[in-house]
Amino acid sequence: MTNPRGRFGIHGGQYIPETLMNAVIELEAAYDHYKDNPAFNRELNDLMVNYAGRPSLLYEAKHMTEDLGGAKIYLKREDLNHTGAHKINNVLGQALLAKKMGKTRLIAETGAGQHGVATATVAALLGMECVVFMGIEDTKRQALNVYRMRLLGADVVPVTSGTGTLKDAVSEAMREWTSRIADTHYCLGSVMGPHPFPTIVRDFQAVISKEIKAQILDKEGRLPDAVIACVGGGSNAIGSFYNFIDDKDVALIGCEAAGRGIDTFETAATINTGRLGIFHGMKSYFCQDKYGQIAPVYSISAGLDYPGIGPEHAHLHDIGRAQYVAITDEEAVEAFEYLSRIEGIIPAIESAHAVAYAMKIAPKMDKDQIIVITISGRGDKDVAAIARYRGEDLHD
Amino acid sequence: MTDHKTNRIAKAFDHGKAFVAFITCGDPDLETTGKVVRQAAANGADLIELGIPFSDPTAEGPVIQGANIRALAGGVTTDKIFEFVEDLRRDVDIPMVFMTYANVVYSYGTEKFVKICSKIGIDGLILPDVPYEEKADFQPICQQYGLSLISMIAPTSHDRIAMIAKEAEGFLYIVSSLGVTGERQAITTDIGAIVDVVRQNTDIPCAIGFGISTPEQARTMAQKADGAIVGSAIVRRLEQYGRDAAEPVGAYVKSMKDAIADL
């Protein structure tokens, strides 16, 4: 799927300052060297199993299935991983790679804080220095995660530039990387940015679909009819889709954050409202104005509050292999509450976007059909924000 | 058609060491930008880099980020900047290039953008997020319309220098230091070694930018190359003096050009 220089169809590429070019070239060479190296993979697998707790469960959501009255629903429980989200899969891979490259310091951007927490965690484990850039708005929305990162020994730098959200955290991490390359690896958290990041992150997240496939074949003896995941940059979605791309009968559905609606300016639904552009190192779709100024996007979910989408998703959209739908704040909050009540599982508000779409389509599907929803993370971090959304002020 | 345009950039290096001044268009408004450009030209600037503001300028430090925010908040757009340059060109003959980000050009329609640049008298483009590997999106169109796509070389370029220099056009922008734009106390990169490799591969001039703010720094840098580029130190004066920045910028440009003119 990956062409030279990380092209996915017309998307991808390496649109970065010259200062960073040798760093990404060095990273690509190291990744090519280690990705099929048995010792590296043994070490990574050991961490995945014994530290992160993989494989994650594929849980049959019987109450939800019965309540919706259509397709049988399974939940891929990435929320049960150590640190509470899929982000650890990628961080373990990249941090181990960085260590092999002789880097001693990890920097990362974070939106909801999940990637920052995962990076801070693995840095603590591997004895590396860690600096996390987080939009000032997100440090307020996700104060608990800020404290967790500091507890784990990371420096959290609140980013005040731009809109003070995820895109600005990415910009600031890129700026930091250009100033300190020799000892520092930029542990990018999603399938975005310049090549080779979209490929590396996808490969480390592909464990999700690899496990789903084995688990569903074991339980059902066949592949699912649909795999549904939320999409910001798109790492849990590409991880959930990747091993099904060649299985044409499996529908792949990414759920974008519509915010207050795709007909408003307060949205982060890139495929539904954006257009082709070049930003943060990649050619892809972006929310932008007619002059190419990046739009100040909005979603209740800090993790989906990003104006772009990974280049492989843009390509899967172009060729019609995956479908990208928009879910509003209200729909996501309803799904957040629904899954909590009906299955006793509090999903991350990001993942609730995927649950919301499953709630729309499952009743229209046959009982012998199967949907897998990736629960990319757990929702503890969101409880205070959802309470606020519902007009209750919790003192946390 | 190519010759005329390329020649205007070459002219910037005809008066001893060149002083290149960066100004963000529309900070705080285009009328001020016009006055500042004229003052800079009158006081010895040899080439003007006109910044088209971008919402998320990832290669810029806080000072130029601030200029981008002020300019966009003031309502400047690419189309307004095109009109402004067309007007400016009636009495300003100094070589001028646009400095902006890939998306500003790509989103406008690269060919449409470059065609207008050519018509209004812009001589080149600097796109800091377009490295050698991605220039195919922009360079052939620039060549077709007689603009130079300026290439950059960084302290980390090492074995890439020769490759970049061989295909460079207009002038080579040598990034003095790691990191983003902004004034620095000291520049520690071995610029001389970079320029030596460049010289083995091309005859086009080299100008050094990032971190230069004092006449002494400009002199030290210009000794090693064909010119010095200053952005943040000028933009800081815009931030400080706003609509009255033309004279302080003019005086500053004179002090900088005087420091390098006799080299």
Image (tube, grey):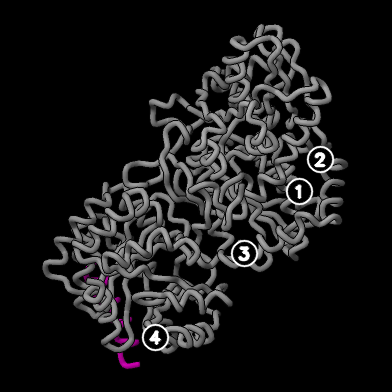
Q: Secondary structure at mark 1?
A: helix
Q: Which residues are magenta?
A: B246-263
Residue A274 at what x, y percent from top left? 42, 37
Give the residue type at disc 3: Ile
Cα distance between the residues tagged 3 and 1:
21 Å
Label disc, if present, on residue B203 of the rendered structure = 4
Q: Quadrant of the C terminus of chain A?
A: top right
Three-letter residue code for mark 2: Ala
Q: Are marks 1 and 4 in contact (CB under 8 Å)?
A: no
Per the image, the residue denoted by label 2 is A52
Q: Does the residue at mark 1 contact the one at mark 2 (Cβ under 8 Å)?
A: yes
- Residue A148 visible? The answer is no
**Circle 4: element type:** loop
Q: Is residue B256 magenta?
A: yes
Could you tell me which residue is drawn at 66 percent across and 22 percent down?
A225
Q: Determine which residue is flagged by label 3.
A: A25
Alpha-carbon span between mark 1 and mark 2: 9 Å
- B129 versus A144 height, above or below: below
Tell me the element at label 3. Answer: helix
In this picture, is A223 found above or below B129?
Answer: above
Q: Mark 1 highlights which residue?
A: A92
B31 lies left or right of A351: left
Q: Chain of mark 4?
A: B
The mark nearer the N terminus, 3 or 1, is 3
Q: A139 or B120: which is nearer to us? A: B120
- Residue closer to the observer: A196 or A289: A196
Q: Report the mark closest to the observer, 2 or 4.
A: 4
User: How far apart, in angstroms, are the residues tagged by discs 2 and 4?
Assistant: 56 Å
